[in-house]
Image (cartoon, grey):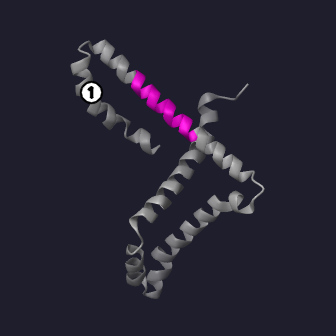
Amino acid sequence: MGFLALLPALLGALSPILARVLPDEGQRLQVQLDLQKALIDQQGDLGRAMAEVMKADAGSESPLARNARPITVLWALAMITWVGVVSPMLGLQVEVVAALKGVPAELWSLLTVGIGAYMLARSVDKLVPQVVGPKG
C-alpha cells in the first residue's frame, strides 16, 4: 500500500496546478478522479505482476527459487530476535548495533524494498479476488 498512501499528498500538490490549467471546478474534479483511478489501476497491475512472479517462484523446480522468500523472512526474524532479544540479554547490544551501522545504506534499501515488495504482492494476491470477485 506504500505508494497509495502518497496519493493524497500527490493530488494535493497537483491541485493548484490543475486550478490554473482547469478553472472549471467540475473538470478539475474529473481530472483528479481520473488521475486517482489511473494511479490505483497502475498500482494494482504492479501488484498482480509481482504476485505472478511469486507464483512462478513457488512452482519452480529449483529449491532455491521456491524457498528464497521464506528463507529471507526467516533470516529477518532471526536478525530481529538477535538484535532485540538475544544480544541485550548477553550484554552485546552496543556491539551489535555498532556492527549494523557499518552495513551500507544501499544494502538496507535493497533488503527493505525486496521484503516490502513481497509483502505488497502477497497482500494484493489475497485482496484482488475479494475486491474483484471470482473469475469466470
Residue 46 x %, y %: 54, 39
Residue 87 x %, y %: 47, 82
Q: Residue at x 59, y 31 (%)?
A: 131
SS at badge 1: helix
The amino acid marked with disc number 1 is Ser
Q: Dividing the image into 4 quarters, which one contains the C terminus? A: top right
Please determine whether, in this image, residue 97 is positioned above or below residue 47.
Answer: below
Magenta portion: prevailing SS class:
helix
Give the residue number, with chain letter if any, for mark 1. 15
**In-front residue for pair 3/93:** 3
Rendered image quadrant of residue 29: top left
Q: Residue at x 41, y 79 (%)?
A: 99
Please determine whether, in this image, residue 20 is positioned above or below residue 73.
Answer: above
List the single residue furthest toward the right.
61
Please determine whether, in this image, residue 4 is positioned above or below residue 85.
Answer: above
Residue 54 x %, y %: 65, 49
Q: Residue at x 54, y 66 (%)?
A: 76
Rendered image quadrant of residue 44: top right
Magenta span includes 39: yes
Magenta span includes 134: no
- From the viewer's perspective, tell me whether residue 50 is left or right of residue 95: right
**In-front residue for pair 63/91:** 63
Crowd band around label 1 with a 10 angstrom C-alpha radius: few (<14), some (14–19), many (20+) = some
Q: Residue at x 36, y 23 (%)?
A: 32
- From the viewer's perspective, tell me whether residue 134 is left or right of residue 87: right
Rendered image quadrant of residue 106: bottom left
Q: Which residues are magenta?
A: 34-47
- From the viewer's perspective, tell me whether residue 34 is left or right of residue 86: left
Q: How many marks?
A: 1
